[in-house]
Structure formats: structure tokens, C-alpha cells
Amino acid sequence: MDYTEGQGWHDPRIIPYQPLTLDPASMIFHYGQSVFEGLKAYVTKKEQVLLFRPDENFKRLNKSNDRLCIPHLDEELALEALKTLIQVDRDWIPNAEGTSLYIRPFIISTEPYLGVSPSDRYQFIIILSPVASYYKEGIAPVRIAVENEFVRSVAGGTGSAKTGGNYAASLKAQQLSGTKGYSQVLWLDGVERKYIEEVGSMNIFFKVDGEVITPSINGSILEGITRKSVIELLKHWGIPVSERKISIAEIKEAYAAGKLEEAFGTGTAAVISPVGELFWQNEGMSINGGKTGEVTKKLYDTLTGIQSGMVEDHFNWCIEVK
Ligand code: PMP
């Protein structure tokens, strides 16, 4: 679908997957005006196709649009377009356990113009790809390193938007941590390097002395949909959970006192990712003996169960594509 100033969004269409033809002066190539989303469709044992909270993705896309000066999309129309596209590609959705159809909606600025200003032309595109199970041999803990040198975002920046520039800014740290054997970095705040923000493509939770805690939404972290679902589930189960500022020093103290019981990341790709080790200031903190914690496992089983239609969806989070 295209956007042209004065005309608004127009010409929705489904076409076979193919290369895009863009003018080399298109503003997206030079000024990074892009937003995107990521979600998954799952096939249930009864052959239903389920989308997990897709309305939240389109709501967040519009929030990102606000920050990047991109015109709003009609969220209901976008969801209808997605459902139609999935029906067209129904045969591509894998149905083996743990597999899914990854969905990537995105918007780019296409006006050919060299100069920094909001574009007056855009394209909204949705691409799809079958994906294998994230965990090939069952849910497995990851090792993550706290990032002290680089920052991903600062208050007032674009950290809360899902825009390409944030990910470009994170590559260097990600690459360096990879060479040291860590799969992701844990970002600290961009001012004091004191407070925990999030992981590369996940929000982060800790279980300390019986309470689950996660950094509050502060304008520089992404408001994860899995994060929101986890908070709702924990409240429903009566497990204490709070959103607040958490310093890395507080986590280290909890570790030293034997009170750091579990840690996990949340995000569409892995759903729940247990953290087995956190590295900070030349010391590796082993969490729950490097094994998946009880609450982490329960959250993983429940969320993946709801998404695949195996666990009752009391919250009405899933939408059936039919
Ligand atoms: N933070 C970042 C930076 C991400 O890229 C993601 C993945 N979208 C998340 C958090 C988790 O968000 P969600 O649960 O909506 O996938």
C-alpha cells in the first residue's frame, strides 16, 4: 500500500514476493525513516491459524510512526490486510511443533529527495516467512553480557520506537559480545550507565527473593507485547510483579546475597528466553545454576501453549485467521 501527501494511504494490493524498485535518492536510504513490526502466526492441531495479539503490533506501529513523523495507518485495515495475505499464503505456514509463520510489516519513506525532512511518500509492506522452532532441543538458557561502553538509546531518543536506526546502533556491541561467547547484550541507560533497560531484541525480567521485577517503560525501551502478556499472566497467577527502575548494582547485590532466583528475556522470537548467566564487571553471575527457573518455564509453557492453541486462551489474546 502506498502513501502520497494529499491522497493518504491508497492502492492496497497483494503481489508475488519480488525485489523492490526504488529511486537511489529515496529518503529511506539516507535518513533512515523506517518502522517495522514482528509477529507470528501459528497453526493449531485443529488446523486453525492463530495470530497472537496482532492489534497490539499495529497499535505499536502507529506509536513508532508518531516518533518517526510517518503518517498513521488504519489499524483495522492493516489487520484485515494481514489476514487476507495469510489466507493467500496459507499453504506456506508450517505446522510442526514449535514452527510458525514470521510476519514482518514495515513502512519506508520512498520520496526521492536529498534533504532532512519528513518524506511525502511511503510504502507499507508485509512480508512473510516460515520459521523453524526457536529452540531446536527444548528451551535452553542463554548467556548475556552487560554493555558498559555503548548505549542503545537515551531518554528523548527513538528507543521506544521500532525503527531500523536503533538496531544499527546496537550492532557493534552485539558483535563484540558475540566474540566473547555471549549471545546478547544487556543495555544500561544512556546517561548514567546504571539502570537496566533491555536486551538486544527482548525485554528483561528478574525474580529476586520471590518477586518478579522488570524495568519500567521509560521512553527509551521498547514496549514489548510479550512483556505486557507476562505481567498480565503473573498478576493472574498471584505472583508478585513490579515495573520499576532496576540498577545493575541491585542485581549484583541480590546475586551476592543468594536472592537472584531467575532471569529471563521476553520477545516474539524466543517468547521466553531463560538467562543462565549474566556477565558484569569481569564476573559471571550464574543464575539458578545455569538452569531454567520454575516461573520462567511456567511462563514459556503457558504462552507457547496459548499461541499454539494447546492452552485455554482465557485472555482472548489470539485471533483466528479465517
Ligand atoms: N525490545 C526490543 C529492542 C525488541 O526488538 C523486541 C522484539 N520486538 C522486544 C524488546 C520484545 O518485544 P515483543 O515482545 O513485542 O516482541
Image: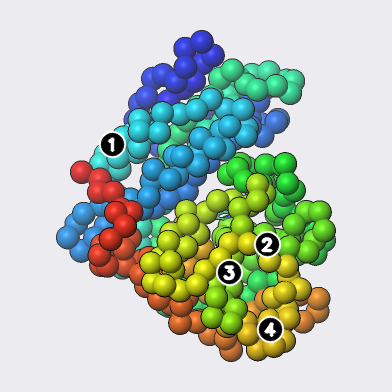
Residue at (44%, 68%) from the top-left corner?
234
Mark 3 highlights which residue? 213
**What number is the disc on residue 255?**
4
CB-based contact (under 8 Å), mark 2 and mark 3 = no
Provide residue 81's location: percent of width, then percent of height: 33, 33
188 up-or-down from 293: above or below: above
258 up-or-down from 168: above or below: below
Quarter of the rendered image showing ligand 1: bottom right
The amino acid pointed to by label 4 is Tyr
> Dividing the image into 4 quarters, which one contains the N terminus?
top left
CB-based contact (under 8 Å), mark 4 and mark 2 = no
The amino acid pointed to by label 3 is Ile
As helix, strand or loop, the secondary structure at mark 3 comes to strand
Gap in angstroms between the C-alphas marked 1 and 2: 42 Å
CB-based contact (under 8 Å), mark 1 and mark 2 = no
Q: Along the polypeptide, which appears first: circle 4 or circle 1?
A: 1
Question: Badge 2: how crowded within 10 Å, few (<14), some, or many (20+)?
Answer: some
CB-based contact (under 8 Å), mark 1 and mark 3 = no
Question: Badge 1: how crowded within 10 Å, few (<14), some, or many (20+)?
Answer: some
Residue at (58%, 44%) from the top-left corner?
162
- Which-is-in-front pick, marks 1 and 3? 3
Mark 1 highlights which residue? 84
Q: Along the polypeptide, which appears first: circle 4 or circle 2?
A: 2
Q: Along the polypeptide, which appears first: circle 1 or circle 3?
A: 1
Asked whether mark 3 lies closer than 8 Å to ligand 1, one says: no
- Which-is-in-front pick, marks 4 and 2? 2
Mark 2 highlights which residue? 245
As helix, strand or loop, the secondary structure at mark 1 comes to helix
Gap in angstroms between the C-alphas marked 1 and 3: 39 Å
> Dividing the image into 4 quarters, which one contains the C terminus?
top left
